[in-house]
Amino acid sequence: MLAAFTALVGAIFGGLWFAPRVIVALKWHQPIRLMSEPPPAHWAAIVRDRVPISKKLRSEDFERLLKLIQVFLAKKNIEGAGGFDVTEEAAITIAAQACLLLIWRNTGMYPGLRTIIVYPSATIPKMLDSSTGGFEESLSPIVGQSWGAGVVILSWDSADFGAFDPRDGKNVVLHEFAHQLDQETGEADGMPVGLPLSAVKPWAEVMEKHFRLLRAADRKGRKTVLDGYGATNYAEFFAVATEAFFEKPERLRHTKPDLYGLLTDFYGVDPADGMRGMGDGLGMEDE
């Protein structure tokens, strides 16, 4: 039945980059269950101090963020590597940024993710080669990486600085956790899980349009609101667009209103309008 359904979608929207595989929204995840006990009282000060973008949140959204952090830290392992010691402040700083993407979405708590490995700075990690089952080193140092095998790698200095400056358009935690949303469908391709069927075609068309525009601009060395790294592939484009959406919302809305509108619907929030929630984002099934 699933094969027939995806074939039908492919026939309807044939030729677009998203591919029928994307409708794995059928294996949707249950909404997050918040804990009955409140988060520790001192967490609020840590989040406001270490993650300044949180100061833009309405009080009820800030409280939900704290509760999401509580669930995140209970369900995910955050491990230090390369001599890095994961303090409570470091764990909360990372969790707060990751959970920012979920505040307004009716979705799971990164169900495929098990472990976040944190290095003190850019590192050359050993990566699992799925074809051989062995490990091989990355070709160059990285500040972050999201694996489909349930692992996110972060460098603490980049994660901390990305949180500290919420207006520079660069945030490695938002970037890698956007990949996690994308990877819930399997291989990351810029089409995250949970899009209602009615949203699939416009999503593909708008993303394709702006991906091509970014590639053209990048080839010419022209800067845009989107980092040129997004021209690498569709997965990187979605992650880069997510960074710009939360960190440069006014400029993104002004220069690429259709892309901004798409992300507003998906994340369920309008960052350019005082971080105003729009109700449930597209992280919900069609009724």
Image: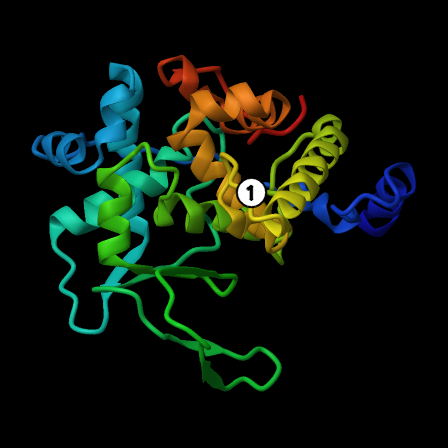
Report if residue 34 is visible in the image.
Answer: yes
Q: Residue furthest left?
A: 42
Q: Residue at x 48, y 50 (%)?
A: 180
Front residue (pair 259, 50)? 259
- Percent across and percent down for residue 134 are 50, 86
Q: Residue at x 71, y 36 (%)?
A: 209
Residue located beneath label 1 in the image: 222
Image label count: 1
Residue 212 lies in quadrant:
top right
Report if residue 70 is visible in the image.
Answer: no
- Percent across and percent down for residue 216 are 67, 45
Residue 175 placement, left or right of 62: right
Residue 5 lies in quadrant:
top right
- Percent across and percent down for residue 42 are 7, 33
Quadrant in which the C terminus appears = top right
Vertical arrangement, residue 96 with respect to residue 3, above or below: above
Q: Residue at x 48, y 55 (%)?
A: 112
Vertical arrangement, residue 205 with respect to residue 234, above or below: above
Front residue (pair 169, 39)? 169
